[in-house]
């Protein structure tokens, strides 16, 4: 069976380096924050092209702490999308703010036209908009130039959810550098993934950086004395050491993801009933996922591929606004979310991870073509 993703393969490929890094931390005797975490923060900031990075316990915490550092809380509204991991929306509510969900465009990112229409028609008496969270879903950059222009027009902060787009660029600029602050997940299946959970926040702003460091550790400015109300969200030094190894190989891993995507593009071109991923002009994705759309036949395609030994996943089967915890109570943007609801029924993530062999890619392509041909 060809797996859709395989984080263990990433460990086995660099087992000696990772095991040595773990041993280094165990021998150090420093098991909370410390030099290993600081070194990872510095190396990640250099990779991301920003001045500062603050490592935290998860990607969800990265969003929460970024929002809190921006001063977002009760009485505020944050505009984002429903076609995303639920963490994006959960983080907004966890800081006491109101999420307002806007439809996506053909590249599965926040639709600038719908964003502008939503802000233009903002209802009086509703929580005031304070921030926008564009999500670079599947490793595809969102329409940041247009989004930033709208944000500037309305005086809104932009927090980029970069959890699936480590290293993606738009017009030569790495995503995460457009807004004031960016949050990244370091979950095991991410392009840069720990062996456990983790997250990191990146920014050029020293004031936000100070706030993030205080907020992640109880609001301490001096040990055991909370100057502000914070929380406990510290990246483990063991994970930091592992991530330092993986970060050094991330450019090569990204190149491999792009090569796999190019093979899919070529091998699946013209396949009846299948829509291949769309990339906006000027964008260079990092293909956290390679997501096709199979309108009206996604589930049948997935089942047939499983029988042929090709694993796939659906990211994400139920939009956040239709999930039981949120349905009927989360405000929606102008025009509703018709594309979001449509793509949730058609998207399918093909096998995608750097250790995927060329023979497996060829096998997956042939299986997909065969299934689609038989269906036609």
Image: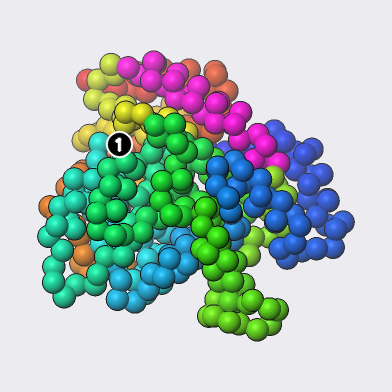
The secondary structure type at the circle numbered 1 is loop
Based on the picture, tell me whether residue 262 belongs to the magenta stretch.
Answer: yes
- Residue 38 in view of the camera: yes
Rendered position, 110 above or below 92: above
The kind of secondary structure the magenta stretch mainly shows is helix
Based on the picture, tell me whether residue 145 belongs to the magenta stretch.
Answer: no
* Disc 1 target residue: 107
Count all numbered tags in the image, as a single digit.
1
Residue furthest toward the right? 27
Image location of residue 332, percent across then percent down: 20, 60
- 350 displayed left or right of 331: right
The answer to which of 253 and 298 lies nearer the viewer is 253
The answer to which of 145 and 340 lies nearer the viewer is 145
Q: Residue at x 12, y 60 (%)?
A: 121
Q: Residue at x 45, y 18 (%)?
A: 263
Region in magenta: 245-269
Colouring rule applied to residues: rainbow
Query: Which quadrant would residue 357 be assigned to in this image?
Result: top right
- 32 displayed left or right of 330: right
Quadrant in which the C terminus appears: top left
Image location of residue 307, percent across then percent down: 42, 30
Image location of residue 239, percent across then percent down: 68, 53
Q: Residue at x 79, y 38 (%)?
A: 16
Image location of residue 212, percent across then percent down: 55, 65
Residue furthest toward the bottom? 225
């Amino acid at each position: 069976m060809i797996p859709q993703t395989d984080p263990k393969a990433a460990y086995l490929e660099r087992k000696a380096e990772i095991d040595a890094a773990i041993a280094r931390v165990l021998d150090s005797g420093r098991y909370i924050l410390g030099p290993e975490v600081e070194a990872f923060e510095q190396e990640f900031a250099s990779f991301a092209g920003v001045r500062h990075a603050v490592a935290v316990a998860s990607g969800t915490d990265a969003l929460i702490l970024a929002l809190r550092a921006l001063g977002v809380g009760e009485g505020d509204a944050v505009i984002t999308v429903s076609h995303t991991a639920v963490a994006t929306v959960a983080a907004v509510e966890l800081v006491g703010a109101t999420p307002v969900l806007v439809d996506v465009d053909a590249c599965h990112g926040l639709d600038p036209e719908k964003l502008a229409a939503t802000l233009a028609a903002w209802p009086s008496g509703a929580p005031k908009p304070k921030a926008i969270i564009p999500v670079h879903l599947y490793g595809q950059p969102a329409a940041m130039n247009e989004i930033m222009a709208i944000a500037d027009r309305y005086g809104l902060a932009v927090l980029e959810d970069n959890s699936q787009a480590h290293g993606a660029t738009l017009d030569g600029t790495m995503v995460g550098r457009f807004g004031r602050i960016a949050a990244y997940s370091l979950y095991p299946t991410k392009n840069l993934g720990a062996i456990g959970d983790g997250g990191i926040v990146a920014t050029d702003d020293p004031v936000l950086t100070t706030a993030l460091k205080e907020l992640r550790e109880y609001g301490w400015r001096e040990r055991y004395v909370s100057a502000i109300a914070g929380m406990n969200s510290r990246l483990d030094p063991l994970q930091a050491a592992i991530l330092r190894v993986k970060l050094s190989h991330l450019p090569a891993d990204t190149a491999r993801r792009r090569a796999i995507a190019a093979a899919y593009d070529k091998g699946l071109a013209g396949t009846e009933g299948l829509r291949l991923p769309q990339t906006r002009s000027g964008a260079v994705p990092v293909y956290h996922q390679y997501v096709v759309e199979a309108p009206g036949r996604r589930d049948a395609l997935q089942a047939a591929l499983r029988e042929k030994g090709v694993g796939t996943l659906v990211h994400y089967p139920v939009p956040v606004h239709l999930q039981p915890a949120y349905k009927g109570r989360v405000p929606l943007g102008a025009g509703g979310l018709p594309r979001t609801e449509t793509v949730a029924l058609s998207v399918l993530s093909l096998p995608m991870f750097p250790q995927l062999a060329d023979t497996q890619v060829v096998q997956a392509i042939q299986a997909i073509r065969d299934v689609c041909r038989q269906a036609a």
